[in-house]
Amino acid sequence: MRNLVSFSNGTKECEYKKILLSNVMVTRKRNLFWGRKWRTLDIKMGIWFLTVHLLLLFAPFTFTWNAFWASFWTYMLFGTCGITVAYHRVLAHRSLILPKWLEYIFAYLGVLSFQRDPIFWVSIHRYHHQYVESEKDPHSPTFGFWFSHMGWLFDSGYIIEKYQERKNVEDLKSQVFYKFIQRTYVLHLFAFAAIVYALGGFTYVVWMLGVGGTWGYHSTFLVNSACHIWGNQIWDTNDLSKNNWWVALISFGEGWHNNHHAFEYSARLGLEWWQIDLGWYVIRFLKAVGLATNVKMPTEEQKLKKSFCSHHKFK
């Protein structure tokens, strides 16, 4: 698979390095820690992520089966219904329509995943698709693995620099619910943490915020990083997106990322019967009971237009 980013200013390809075990080359530079301005938001984000990961260290000493299952089921609920279905397929791409009451409930579960408010999340994701692999992509691996994985989250100056207007989420900004969540986002996180502590003390905080939070973060982040570096390309998307089965397993189907970039409007990401896609299974159930309508999927004609003529899989 070729690196789709062109070299500028007379720079030779040999001056760049490939990301390990891939053909993706780091062709752009961005200082992750030193030599850049750290804004207050960046420091707060850094402290929060450090805290969540430090909580993880207490997991072996606080293990109980009740805490484990509480962490597991909240991770499953928030990840499938909150992030994968609501944030991504309903709000970012309008791949299906849910009744407003259900859309808001699912979106609120996404809020409790600690991945920013819906307006921010959807805006960044839409910019990713609009500018994929270009200079304005918010998290392309052409800036390096760690920047695409999570480094961009601590660089609010990068986001401000690229997107001055942030006018790609007017549909959400026009709804009172999403504007309210945006203004009060941090309060919801503190309230949730307080409830977790009240229910199970420090043990539940460790497992539901530390273990569940860390796992949830990195399963999402791997879609941005690993799925643009390692895996197979089935569709001609003119970008670096890959289908990655092991990321799909831990991210509720989001790892079928080449499928997604080929047909970003599709409510189903695992297009083959064997491509496990838990998000799609939830949507299919909601459709069966009449709660999901206008569920979009690619037609055979649309698939043919995006397929490589030889149907080879590029690694």
Image (spheres, rainbow, N blue to C red):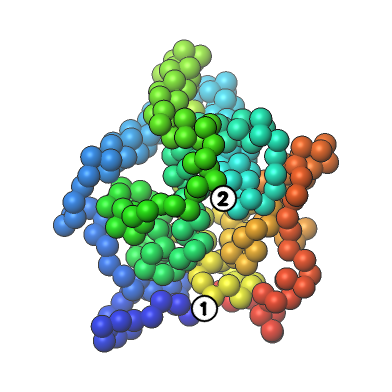
View extreme (top): residue? 198
Residue drawn 47% across and 46% down? 121
Give the x, y percent position of residue 31.
24, 59
Q: Amino acid at mark 1?
A: Met
Q: Which residue is mark 1?
A: 1
Q: Residues within 10 Å of mark 2 (few under 14, many from 20)?
A: many
Label whose residue precedes the other's in the sequence (2 or 1)? 1
Query: 129 above or below 192?
Result: below
Q: Which residue is mark 2?
A: 92
Q: Is residue 131 visible?
A: yes
Q: Is residue 306 left or right of residue 241?
A: right
Residue drawn 48% across and 17% down? 195
Q: Is residue 261 left or right of residue 39?
A: right
Secondary structure under tag 1 reads loop
Looking at the rendering, in which quadrant would you find the C terminus?
A: bottom right
Q: Is residue 88 left or right of residue 277?
A: left
Q: Is residue 213 visible?
A: no
In front: mark 2 or mark 1? 2
Give the x, y percent position of residue 66.
57, 21
Give the x, y percent position of residue 109.
56, 32
